[in-house]
Image (cartoon, coloured by chain):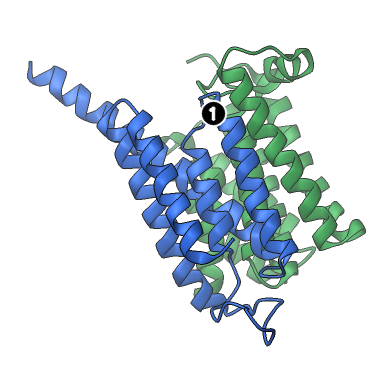
Chain colours: A green, B blue
Amino acid sequence: MKVDFFKEDLRQAAHLMVGIVSVLLVQYIGFNSALLFLLAIFIVGLVLSNFKLLGGKVKLVDYLLSLTDRNDPIPGKGAMFFAAGILFLLVFAKPLDFALAMILLHAAGDAFATVIGLRFKQPLPWNNKKSWFGFTSFIVFGAVAAQFFIPLQTAFLYAFFLAIVESLNLSIDDNISVPVFALLLSKVV
Amino acid sequence: MQEPAFIILIALSALAIIWLKRDKYSRLTVVISLLLTLVLVTVLKQLYGDPRPCVGLPGCEPDFGFPSGHSALSFSLAMNLFGASSFYLAIFLAILVALSRVISGAHTFAQIAGGMILGVIVSTTIAIVFQKLKEKYEQNKRAKK
């Protein structure tokens, strides 16, 4: 399958920005206000996705989807799952610093893993759709992003295990499996 | 809304959705997602042990408050209608149920947010897993023929 690098880079830039903006919102307007704001956007997103699925047209949404969407049967599926993952971490992961660290880890790790992994292909033995470069990028960039809120060694430990989860070929979307596993891992660690 | 009335309402809505769904996989998705949401809410309430804001006041439910079962079940049910025009009404009602829990003092905002996200994630994940199972089953069936 031919990869549209421009579209994919734009998509990953948006992925990274959403993660950073979510963290900044929590930092600057407070937990409850940020949660309310993000939930409202998420629900509006769900409604718009349903509207598009039923054949509706919204010019701005169509334009944004044409720039970044992977032509999933469900419009904006990736963005919806990523937002759900962020909200999941915000409400379920405790303390808040850990939740923010995991949001940044996932946003940066996943974005750089895709951008780098698509360009330098050397398949992983357990999943030939993912590359060693992508796997390593997830760990390095994810850990560097997460160390703003948790110690660097802990960040690397989480990044390593979450990179493994991200690289697995699961039925569940990685925007959900990574946050859920991060939470489970925090209970073990 | 009181507990028994809410459970009856959810059960009736679930039955209506099951009746509306065309194939057995979609019907099973509704049942499994609601049951799994219920189980997870019960387990997570015990794990987090987060008290309700009304604790100590008369009429306050005795269990923990995080995540909100009412909002989890409402959103789980609403997500089962994703892709249909009735989704708009379902999501509107789910928001009303969640907000009513905050206004009545039974939950904090974070507690209903937890329920909302749990309901959405469980329903969509179950729907995707069942869709993949359905595709696999149909592929095998075609291969046998």
SS state under label 1 = helix
Asked whether residue A171 is in view, the answer is no
| Residue A154 position in % (x across, y down) | 64, 70
Q: Please name the residue shown 68% across and 87% down the image.
A: B56
| Residue A143 position in % (x across, y down) | 68, 58
Q: Is residue B102 above or below residue A70?
A: below
- Density class for disc 1 (Cα within 10 Å; few <14, some 14-19, many ≥20) is few
Q: In this view, does A147 lie above or below B52?
A: above
Quadrant of residue A17 in the image?
top right
Quadrant of residue B71 in the image?
bottom right
Q: Please name the residue shown 71% across and 15% down the image.
A: A62
The answer to which of B109 and A189 lies nearer the viewer is B109
The answer to which of B84 and A180 lies nearer the viewer is B84
Q: Please name the residue shown 60% across and 52% down the image.
A: B116
Asked whether residue B45 is in view, the answer is yes
Quadrant in which the C terminus of chain A appears:
bottom right
Q: Please name the residue shown 45% across and 58% down the image.
A: B7
Label 1 resides on the chain identified as B
Q: Is residue A167 left or right of residue B26?
A: right
| Residue A86 position in % (x across, y down) | 67, 51
Judging by the rendered image, the residue that carries numbered circle 1 is B86
Q: Which amino acid does label 1 sit on?
A: Ser
